[in-house]
Image: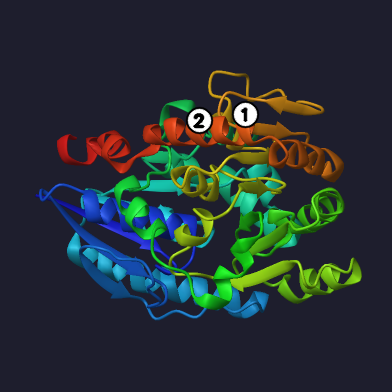
Amino acid sequence: MKKVFFLIPTLSIGGGERVVSELSLNFNKSINTTIILFKKEISYPYKGRIVSLDIFFSKNPFLKIYFYLKALNKFRKIVRSEKPDYIISFGHPANVINILSKRRGSKVLARVDNFYSSSCYGFGGAVYKLLIKILFNRADIIIDVSKESAEDLVENFGVKEKKVKVIYNPLDIKKIDALSVEPLLKEHEKIFENPVVINMGRMNRQKGQKYLIEAFLQIKNKIKNTKLVILGEGELEEELKAFSKKYGLSEDIYFLGWQKNPFKFLARSKMFLLSSLWEGLPYVLLESMACSLPIVSFDCASGPREILAPGTDFKIKMKGIEYAKYGILVEKQNKDLLAKASIELLSNNGMLLKMKEKSRERINDFDIKNIIKEWDFLEHD
């Protein structure tokens, strides 16, 4: 039996957290799973043992270093004691701690879920970019969620190509089908009596929801009864609410927070809009497509093109609007074109139906029953 550790800050709210959930639930019985958390926050189902390091990460840079070192020390002791065959880490701090804890007999896998050339900004980002260059080649395998992000690591951070393995995010379509038909609360049912465009994700700089709101203003001017629903939480929530009020949209934009079951909201919407400035492989696109939602997305690095236009050159970032095989790609940060593509789609029922079918067709490639095969090397290595 193989002993596999997952190292991740929490098992609550996020794409990486959902991946840990799906993998732990679907690994074969020959894999013994332990999920090690910095802090015991759990909102997703899982299989295996939970161990909490009981670490609080402060925003204060000095305290942050202290807690990093404390987590590193605690984790090293667990690794020395239990001698796992594989340690798979998720996210910036976990990857650093995992690589620095490497010992003979355990293989270290660092999972990358973002486009690092864009995602690391400010002083902290500069430090992390330096750590990538210094540390990542010490890992045995770098698991990347997209081809474009993987190429970025090789070309811009000096990571050895032979160490990088691309495995797409998985999701359980059968489970999503069941969750998508759960009833809404009465207060939410009223929203969906109108055509709804929806967005889901953390409210921060990366997700570009200001562009989304500005695009929605144009959509609203053309299709009067349209509503916008935003699922998620984040540091920009109050700013975005004020931004909505500024444009007179307070009665038309619904901030519904983080939802344990987002699929019942997605399934009742008309389309999903992705306004992100960068991604890794956006889990929200996959979740929306599993609910047969048509997609309009910024052509950002990285992931949307690989999902919606597989086989095209992800290095080329197009101008204008591209009607791809499985969705619509729009020039990044162009709110006017995001609105234009959305209005066209909402005004064309035939196009909407066709794109619903295309979303459902494409999402089968990401079903857990297919993606889990990519992890077979854990059993047989």
Residue 105 as seen in the image, left or right of residue 129: left
Residue drawn at the location 77% of the way across and 29% of the way down: 321
- The image quarter containing residue 11 is bottom left
In contact (CB < 8 Å): disc 1 and disc 2? no
- The image quarter containing residue 304 is top right
Residue nearest the observer in this picture, 20 or 245: 245
Q: Tell me where residue 44 appears, x and y as whole percent.
A: 36, 66
In the image, residue 135 above or below residue 231: above
- The image quarter containing residue 64 is bottom right
In the image, residue 262 above or below residue 173: below
Q: Which residue is mark 2?
A: 358
Residue drawn at the location 22% of the way across and 36% of the way down: 376
Disc 1 vs disc 2: which is toward the camera?
Answer: 2
Say what amino acid the circle numbered 1 marks. Glu
Q: Is residue 176 visible?
A: yes
Q: Mark 1 packing: few (<14 Cα in 10 Å), some, or many (20+)?
A: few
Mark 2 element type: helix
In the image, residue 191 above or below residue 312: below
Q: Earlier in the sequence, mark 1 or mark 2?
A: 1
**Res 346 label:** none
Residue 55 as seen in the image, left or right of residue 82: right
Q: CA distance from mark 1 to mark 2?
A: 33 Å
In the image, residue 238 above or below residue 101: below
Q: Tell me where residue 96 appears, x and y as whole percent.
A: 48, 57
Residue 129 as seen in the image, left or right of residue 339: left
Say what amino acid the circle numbered 2 marks. Lys
Residue nearest the observer in this picture, 24 or 237: 237
Q: Tell me where residue 318 appears, x and y as whole percent.
A: 76, 25
Q: Tell me where residue 299 appears, x and y as whole percent.
A: 70, 35
Quadrant where the C terminus is found in the figure: top left
Q: Which residue is mark 1?
A: 155
